[in-house]
Amino acid sequence: QVQLVESGGGLVQAGGSLRLSCAASGRTFSTYAMGWFRQAPGREREFVALIRHEGGSAYYTDSVKGRFTISKDDAKNTVYLQMNGLKPEDTAVYFCAARATYTLTNYRRDREYPYWGQGTQVTVSS
């Protein structure tokens, strides 16, 4: 099993920044990529960003490109999501997820990720 713990959420004004962290433990060698998803009230969970363990290739949903950056610290088994230029529409619970397959087929689908954190709330005020 893989355990994921998110931190770093909070309340911020529009235009502000937050950095989310996701610490992984357990059988982390069984995972190949880490992703961030978010879920706003009344909406489905949506893909935000993903980073491969090998090589560090990163992928983003269009609405966050240029504002969010996903990164990793292998020594700490931690993945980060730096969020700049936050907008009220970024308000959501943000989840960290780990992918157990090397290929990135359907990487935007949450069902492709077997391991999930508990989520951290991000609220952006206007």
Image (spheres, rainbow, N blue to C red):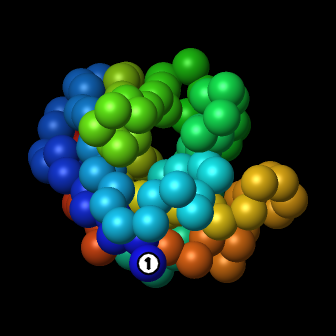
- Percent x, y of residue 10: 14, 49
Task: Find residue 4 and report its image quarter.
Answer: bottom left
The answer to whether 117 appears left or right of 123 in the picture is right
Q: Is residue 39 left or right of residue 94?
A: right
Element type at mark 1: loop
Whole-percent x, y for residue 12 in the image: 16, 38
Q: Is residue 61 visible?
A: yes
Q: Residue furthest left?
A: 11
44 or 60, which lies in front? 60
Q: Where does the N terminus fall, quadrant-wise?
A: bottom left
Left or right, residue 55 beside residue 18: right
Label 1 crowd (10 A; few <14 / some 14-19 / many >=20): few
Q: How many marks?
A: 1
Judging depth in this view, the residue of 108 and 87 nearest the camera is 108
Horizontal arrangement in the rendering, residue 84 relative to residue 65 (left or right): left
For the residue marked with disc 1, what is the amino acid? Answer: Gln
Q: Quadrant of the C terminus?
A: top left
* Residue occupying the point 56% across, 19% down: 66
Give the image location of residue 112, x and y in percent.
70, 72
93 shown above or below 61: below
Q: Tell me the residue at 37%/23% (across/down).
A: 85
Q: Residue at x 43, y 48 (%)?
A: 89
Name the residue located 41 percent from the left edge and 34 percent from the top edge: 74
In terms of depth relative to the viewer, which is nearer, 65 or 55? Answer: 55
Question: Could you tell me if residue 14 is visible in this image?
Answer: no
The residue identified by callout 1 is 1
